[in-house]
Amino acid sequence: MRLILLGPPGAGKGTQAQRLVRKYGIVQLSTGDMLRAAVKAGTPVGRRVKDIMETGKLCPDDLVVDIVADRIEQPDAGKGFILDGFPRTTAQAQALDRMLAERGLKLDAVIELNVDPAVLCDRIASRNAQAKARGEALRSDDDPEILKRRLEAYWNQTVPLIDYYRSRRVLKTVDGMAPIETVANAVEDALDGAR
Ligand code: ADP
């Protein structure tokens, strides 16, 4: 099973991805996590993206595409994967199409978690408060000003992908405002229809 989870920051992609990982035995590939790990480890890629990420802008397409191409070659991705946070631009989506075609693979579904922009900031604010209560450090890009920039990047650069995948007939839209369980069930129904 090869899936894309599409949705703005705070839409619940990570939560839903974890459930799908358990259910289907596939891996979750989060470009955000991979890039944060690179920054933390101080790799050449990490040094290139640190400032970009901290301002809430998108990292260069070629760099992110290379990271994903390497990652899907790993043996643990053999059974399939969920892409979380990738693709985020039309150029990335086209690169992914090429990557999959070269390997004789195809996407089973693209799941769009549809949420009201007004609730996103509230959700992220409460995610921040919970992390703080657990004594964890906040993600520096969860700062409200930077979050605004991440949302702008989403509306401007990622929303066009919804049409891109709709026209390829792989798009499934799920109401991301419902409780977690309800969203999870809707995602499963959408996937049952996709196979
Ligand atoms: P979000 O919580 O907004 O879904 P992520 O954890 O997926 O955020 O990503 C955090 C940051 O990492 C983004 O703001 C961006 O700078 C960078 N990033 C992650 N994925 C991509 C991508 N596919 N293309 C470009 N930049 C990316």
Image (tube, rainbow, N blue to C red):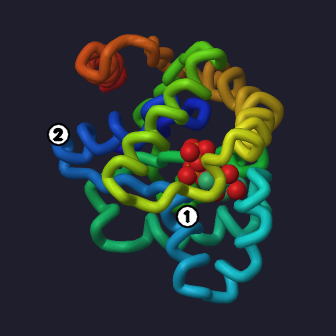
Judged left or right of residue 54, residue 5 is left
Q: Is residue 38 above or below residue 152?
A: below
Q: Viewer-proximal residue, 181 or 193?
A: 181
Image quarter (top left, top right, bottom left or bottom right) of the N terminus: top left
**Quick check: can you spot residue 72?**
yes
Would the CB of label 1 be found within 8 Å of ligand 1?
yes
Q: Position of residue 134 (x, y in %)?
A: 31, 52
**Mark 1 secondary-structure assignment:** helix
Q: Residue at x 33, y 18 (%)?
A: 183
Instruction: Give the mark nearest the N terminus, 1 or 2.
Output: 2
Say which amino acid is labelled 1: Val
Q: Could you say whether the residue bearing mark 2 is in a helix, strand or loop?
A: helix
Q: Residue at x 78, y 56 (%)?
A: 55
Q: Can residue 89 be seen here?
A: no
Q: Position of residue 176 (x, y in %)?
A: 45, 18
Where in the figure is residue 90, as x and y percent of width and height?
Answer: 76, 41
Q: Is residue 101 left or right of residue 155?
A: left
Which residue shows up at 17% across the image and 39% down it? 23
The residue singled out by tag 1 in the image is 68
Which residue is denoted by mark 2 in the rendering?
23
Q: Nearer the viewer, residue 192 or 144?
A: 144
Question: Residue 19's image quarter?
Answer: top left
Looking at the picture, tell me which residue is in the foreground, 41 or 189.
41
Q: Quadrant of the C terminus?
A: top left
Q: Image height check: is 148 above or below 59?
A: above
Compare residues 168 and 112 and report the one nearer the observer: 112
The structure residue drawn at horizontal position 27% and vertical position 51%, both measured from the top left corner, is 26
